[in-house]
Image (cartoon, helix red, strand yellow):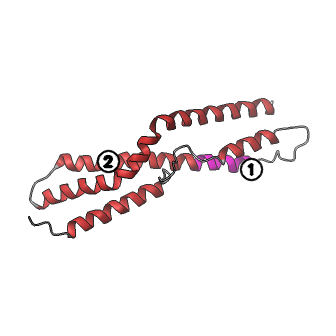
Amino acid sequence: MICHRMREIISLTQLMYNLIDDYAAVYKKMLMYEQFFASTTICMLAYCAAEKLDQGEVQAIMMLLCIGATITLYIPCYLCTFLRSKISAVSDACWDIPFWEATGITIRPYLVLIMQRCLRPLPFQAPGFQEVSIKTFSSKMTSAYSLFNMLRQADFEF
């Protein structure tokens, strides 16, 4: 019974990894380039909205675009961080199972397989890009804020 249940758990885990791989095959490049251009895009949208606000105009569309760009950057970063924490929790739960030394029950290979699969990195990584995580979101927003402050302090009198 336990071996059958472990096979079922491993097959469901494999289906989840296949789903993540399929999603990454479609959206990986978009997510990587979104990270690359996000800080400058958010900075320029915020700067244009702030300049118009200083002149007395309210640019609602510019503000909505800035908020939308921020949310578009945040959601994949949050979901990848959430998924990484859940995968680590599965690995830790396998480690804490008291069946490691049980006699007559051979589920140790299943537990080892699950833990090895949990150690693989998420497919949302590429050389030259940061991994998709909340840390990356924080870094990009800090960069956008620094660029925004630099533009606000510059004197562009034409």
The location of residue 13, given as percent across then percent down, is 65, 35
Relative to 21, 35 lies left or right:
left
Q: Does the magenta stretch include residue 94?
A: yes
Q: What residue type is labelled 1?
A: Trp
In this figure, which residue is indicated by the disc labeled 1? 95
Q: Position of residue 93 (x, y in %)?
A: 70, 48
Point 68% across, 43% down: residue: 117
| Residue that appears at 74% across and 31% down | 7
Which residue does the image show at 62% across and 46% down from the upper left?
Answer: 87
Tell me the crowding category of disc 2: few under 14, some 14 to 19, or many 20 or more residues within 10 angstroms, Cα based: some
Residue 41 sits above or below residue 113 on the image: below
Outermost residue toward the right? 103
Q: Name the quadrant of the N terminus.
A: top right
- Return the residue nearer the eye: 39 or 60: 39
Q: Name the residue under label 2.
A: 69
The residue range painted magenta reads 85-95
